[in-house]
Image (cartoon, rainbow, N blue to C red):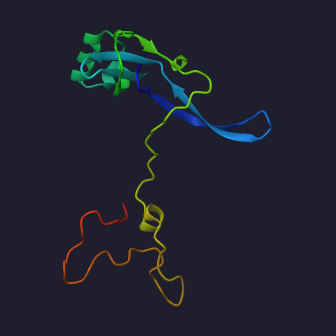
Amino acid sequence: MIQGLVGRKLGMTQIFDKFGNIVPVTLVEVGPCAILELKDSPFKVTLGFDSVKENRLTKPRQGFFKKVGVSPRRIVKEFDSTDNKDYKVGQELKADVFKSGDFVNISGVSIGKGFQGGMKRWHWSGGPAGHGSMHHRRVGSIGASADPARTLRGTNMPG
């Protein structure tokens, strides 16, 4: 059994449960994911998602898809598997592997927000708001004094 599938978040909406309460839900397009590669010991499955034009890929990636015999895919991810005997290269996996009521773990990448200041990025409280202060949203102190005389690695900063 494959331990994951690749999908795309479509958005959010709401549904009503059997008691008439509104429940917020996230819509995720899952699959079809093509099996691109099967590995043994440990069992791994490489999946491809979201078709793409061939000229958008690098030459090595184009060669990989030609060798496998599957149309080019934009996203290629590798997942753990308990056993590979039920799968073959080129097979399409869809959302029907899930049953109604199954619980799934979802991980994703948040959307980019560009260059942000410290108040938004790190939830800093900011400087004084009045009495002539011009330090409302700026970075305050970012390190110690003469010792260590430098900014420590990993210090939260705007960016």
Residue 117: x and y, percent?
Answer: 42, 65
* Residue ID at (46%, 46%): 111
Q: Is residue 139 above or below residue 2?
A: below
Quadrant showing the C terminus:
bottom left
Quadrant showing the N terminus:
top left
* Residue ID at (46%, 70%): 124
Quadrant hosting residue 61: top left
Q: Residue furthest right?
A: 20
Q: Is residue 137 above or below residue 14?
A: below
* Residue ID at (35%, 65%): 156
Q: Is residue 106 above or below residue 154?
A: above
Q: Residue furthest bottom?
A: 131
Quadrant hosting residue 10: top right
Quadrant hosting residue 27: top right
Residue 8: x and y, percent?
Answer: 49, 31
The residue closer to the viewer here, 152 or 134, is 152
Report the side of 101 relative to 67 (left or right): right
Residue 57: x and y, percent?
Answer: 30, 25
Q: Is residue 126 above or below residue 100?
A: below
Question: Looking at the image, can residue 51 be seen?
Answer: no
Residue 40: x and y, percent?
Answer: 25, 17
Question: Looking at the image, can residue 112 be seen?
Answer: yes
